[in-house]
Amino acid sequence: MKRQIITQIQAVVALLLLVAACSDDATDTWQDAGNGSPLTIQVCSDGFSSSDGCPTRAADMGYTTVFQDGDRLGIVAEQVDGSKQNLCATYNGATKAWEGIYYDSKTTYLSAYFPYQEGLTNKLGGISDAGGVLSALKTLLPPSSDQSSLAAYRASDLLAGTCTLHTEGGKSLNVALSHAYSLLLLRAGTEYTTPDGSFAYRTPLRDVQVNVDNAVCTPFASAEGYRLIVDKSGSPSVAWFYTLPDGKTYKVAGSASLSEGTYHLYNNVISGGNRALAVGDFYYSDGGIVPGDTPAPPSEGCIGVVYWVGSIIEDDPLLKEDHPGCTHGLVAALQDAGQTEWSSSYEDITNNWLSKQDAYGITTLKEANKMQGYANTKALEGYNASERATGGNSGKTVLPIGLIRSYAGAYPAPASSSGWYFPSVKELKFMCWGQNANGQSTDGKKKLDEQFGKLTGASSLQSDYYWSSTEYDLSWAWYVYFRSGYVSIDGKYYRSYWVRAVLAF
């Protein structure tokens, strides 16, 4: 069983705002900054362990809880008069600190739970210990039958445990959390391996449901399989149903021996043998791939189409550092991110800003012969946030970066990928030309448009101009004209061109 230790050192600044933002539960004066110093909160969270006693599976599946920016932790506290309060601490991803709770010598911290739930104060009156809190929370916060979204899945995964207060050398609260429910997991599909053995992927599933003691539930699709949190112990009756891209429906059934904090894995992976990746393959949000010659690939979960096969990390040092496993290819997004000018003003970003930085692995945005769009994008994000762009020289923002970030928020990419970025001119021209093109062409565009046409919600590439992330000088940046494949430069603050995101995997 894996554990995650997260240590927090809190700052006083702006904590009152966080307290007020949590809910109407957190309004008592004894959670106010005026009554004490902020508590340093240390959270230890157990991962799910295997129900069949196989520890290697738990390690392989990686079921350690990872907290995200903005997550809220509940602390059930009691004053000397027996009154209860449902306190809220908010996780700051930048500082890795739980913020918003202050020490009070008259307070006993009974129990902790996650995720925080508003409106519990009046429902905790007669509870005097952690066991009573857990029992009440399980009554109030049962798992949802529809966990198809990440938010619904995380809200169903109730964690609860004890609080231990330490007052020597500062005020700190140690929180030990465990999963209050069980986890059912399905790993299924046809699994392929590239001929060199460097990459394995499963075809995504469709219409996945699970019946648990005859109750129909919808699981959450993750890169590791379909997950469902259940309030079950003993041996519930479980049956999974799913459809493969070929249209065949499968059933996986069996009983699971479950207890709190354990998971049970249903494995129905069919080997498809060796298969090389190919331009035109369909790429999915769980990292799965459907072969490009599939007549009717599932639209659900598809986020892009492969347009380049091979590694680009030798061109892009920051990609190599941040995502060394992304050596298999490039994916074009299913829709345009938008249309805009390259910049809101003129600026030679390479000479005036990037040449003085050392965090991006590159010294120039003017490299037109390398696939370094990931590093370009990170550098441009840094520039947009810098004093150079936002201070005395405000108004010099690189506008496509905002479109890419908005697109990434609307269409999340799997953690196994680079995430969406603004392609360099070399990455962009081969999207238009095709991977094996020797010169100007639109063969790549035609192939992508053919594949986009098989998917609901995808849009063809415009027969128009697309910006790249490659700079030319103070006034100009590189573009590709997708009507003919022509590659040239134009004014940053003169033309409004299209933007299409890509990712490496």
Image (tube, rainbow, N blue to C red):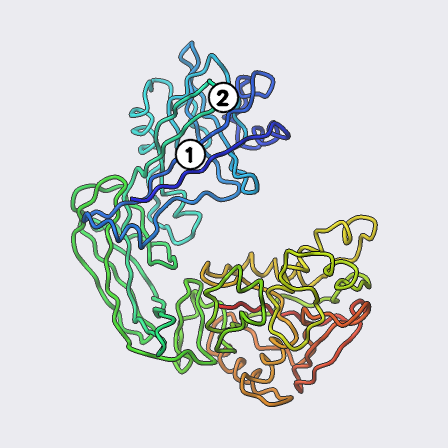
Mark earlier in primary sequence (2, 1): 1
Q: Quadrant of the N terminus?
A: top left
Residue sitting nearer the eye, 287 or 296: 287
Name which residue type carries label 2.
Answer: Lys
For the image, the number of numbered tags is: 2
Q: Which residue is mark 1?
A: 43
| C-alpha separation, residue under disc 2 versus residue under disc 1 | 14 Å
- Image mark for residue 171: 2
Query: Who's the residue at 46% across and 58% down the image?
Result: 415
Query: Residue at (39%, 41%) from the top-left corner?
Result: 4
The answer to whether residue 126 is above or below residue 476 is above
Query: Residue 44, relative to residue 31: is it above or below?
Result: below
Mark 2 surroundings within 10 Å by alpha-carbon count, few (fewer than 14), some (14 through 19), many (20 or more): some
Decide: is 65 above or below 197: above
Q: Position of residue 361 (x, y in %)?
A: 62, 62
Q: Which mark is residue 100?
A: none
Where is residue 252 drawn, in percent x and y?
A: 21, 61
Q: Position of residue 99 (x, y in %)?
A: 54, 31
- Residue flagged by tag 1: what amino acid is it? Val
| On screen, residue 159 above or below 332 | above
